[in-house]
Image: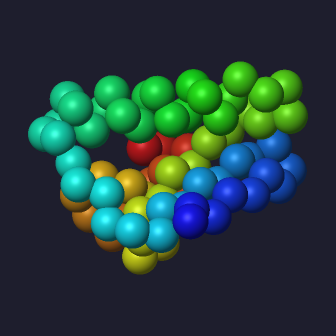
């Protein structure tokens, strides 16, 4: 089961299993769809999507830019 929380306008979704990517464009489409779904609620201004290990989903580095609104 995935973990989900909304705090101070930020929705955070963390997957409990490994999510396999579908290439750069496929990954971007998946993230965009998840973020759009989470942002459809008025209280959510930012959506953060994390993988099983707690890092930004599909991130190529460990900078966790999605948490800072940069990725």
Residue 3: where, in percent of width, then height? 63, 64
Residue 54: where, in percent of width, then height? 48, 72
Residue 40 in which image quadrant: top right
Farthest front residue in view: 1
Farthest bottom residue in view: 53
Residue 57: where, in percent of width, then height? 38, 55
Task: Looking at the picture, tell me which residue is in the foreground, 18 or 57.
Answer: 18
Along the horizontal axis of the image, is 34 left or right of 24? right
Residue shown at 47% from the left, 69% from the top: 16
Q: Is residue 59 visible?
A: no
Residue shown at 32% from the left, 66% from the top: 18
Along the horizontal axis of the image, is 61 left or right of 51? left
Residue shown at 79% from the left, 28% from the top: 41
Number of numbered labels in the structure image? 0
Q: Is residue 12 visible?
A: yes
- Point out the image quarter for the N terminus: bottom right
How is this picture coloured?
rainbow
- Rendered view: 21 above or below 36: below
Residue 7 in which image quadrant: bottom right
Along the horizontal axis of the image, is 36 left or right of 10? left
- Point out the image quarter for the C terminus: top left
Residue shown at 70% from the left, 48% from the top: 11
Residue 26: where, in percent of width, then height? 22, 32
- Rendered view: 27 above or below 33: below
């Amino acid at each position: 089961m995935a973990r989900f929380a909304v705090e101070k306008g930020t929705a955070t979704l963390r997957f409990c299993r490994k999510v396999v990517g579908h290439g750069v464009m496929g990954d971007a489409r998946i993230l965009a769809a998840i973020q759009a779904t989470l942002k459809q609620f008025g209280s959510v201004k930012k959506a953060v999507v994390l993988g099983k290990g707690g890092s930004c989903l599909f991130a190529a580095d460990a900078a966790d830019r999605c948490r800072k609104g940069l990725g």
